[in-house]
Image (cartoon, rainbow, N blue to C red):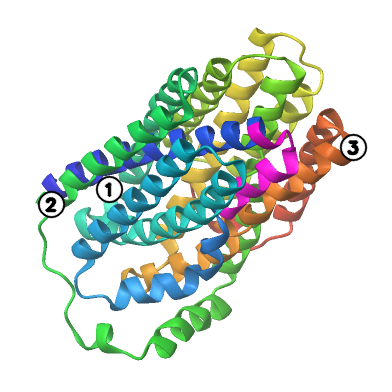
Amino acid sequence: MKNYTLLIINSFLTRLATSSYYLTILWIMYSITKSPFLAGLADGISAAPLLLGFIVGALVYRNKKKKLLAIQSSLLRVIFLCFIFFSLLYNNYIIIISTIYLSTFFIGLSSNIMSSLRVLWLKVFLNEDKYKSGSSTISAIGSLAQISGYILAGFFLLTRFSISIFVLIFFYLISIMPLLFISYSEISDDRTKANLKDIVFAGWNYIKKSESTKELIILDICVGLIFGEIGILLTVLTKTTLDLSPTFLGFFFVSMAAGTAFGALLIKKIHLNFMYTFTLFTMIGAISIAALGFSISISSTLILIFAVGISEGATNVLTFFTYIKIIPKEMTTRIQGIFDTFILGITAFSGIVAGFLIEDVGLVDTLYVESFFLVITIILATRFKELKLIKG
């Protein structure tokens, strides 16, 4: 359990810094450019490396020194944050925007690597009967870290932008400490020496034969597309529609993260089959997102965002638990990489799509479009046969 505890500590610190980073970047970009599209582009670039997820997953699986890889990935974040820090001191908008785009890509790449490592380590450090509670706990801890990160960003954005980035550098540095103390026997057999092409195609071939995995990927793509747009939507809602400070944006993100944590814990108490549970919580998200279009007060906005968070947290844990349950351990990182390509990679476009829709049809109509898309996802889910057989 020592390794699992260290993994949780690392996840908490990393999630805190990452959530704070993305809120900070959204606010900086929207403040500088006044464009939802360009701000959404920055949000989307963070997920662009996930389109290479199937290759990253295979490389992680093949790598014999996964602990060292995790440390190197964490240091990569620190290096590129330093680039942003110095560009802010130089105070040239073109350089700042270019540096943010470039750095956000590589920080996203680092997150991609850590995502594959975290899933692999979760299966190595825990027994099978602990997968659901373990994944639920790490998701809830991650949501609490998000809350801390959003509060942190909301507070420091009231000062200089460069100070906000400096604080993030500090948290990413200390997140490396738990990794130094993780100790376990690395996989060192003939499978890790396999050709990279064979490793990648082994994952693809598994998915082709597994109907439940294909169904899970499709549902996660649909849900991920919508929840991936929340960041830019809340930024525009706070700064333009409600005309509030970044502190309130932090509060809105806190409400979202609190709902996500609550949803992640709540799902542990529900033992319906996959389809009933997925339908219930996705519908909560659809109704809440549509209702945001009618919200005119801070309190009602906080409540509705909390409900959206419940939906996201519950569906994330549900699909993550199902993913761990149906996929063999030796295929984990390879399938995780392909999952990242399809599921998380779609968020590379979600922020851009949201920014475009906001500029074209306005914030309220964009919310209605999101809600309608979630309803369509529920209808699609009812046609999947394999996932209906899986217990929650």
In the shown orientation, is residue 181 left or right of residue 133?
left
Left or right of residue 365, residue 36 in this image: left
Q: Distance of mark 1 from mark 2, alpha carbons? A: 24 Å
From the image, tell me which residue sits under label 2: 180
The picture places residue 40, in percent across and down from the top left corner, at 67, 44
The residue type indicated by label 3 comes to Val
Residue at the location (18% across, 41% down)? Answer: 5
Q: Does residue 33 show up magenta in the picture?
A: yes
Mark 1 Cα shell of 10 Å, populated few (<14), some (14-19), many (≥20): few
User: Mark 1 or mark 2: which comes first in sequence?
Assistant: 1
Q: Which mark is residue 361?
A: 3
Amino acid on which the number 1 mark rests in the picture? Lys
Left or right: 244 with respect to 55? right
Q: Main secondary structure of the magenta part?
A: helix
1 or 3: tag closer to the N-terminus:
1
Name which residue lies at 68% across and 61% down.
Answer: 384
**Which residues, given as a range, are shown in magenta?**
32-45
Q: Which residue is mark 1?
A: 130
Element type at marker 2?
helix
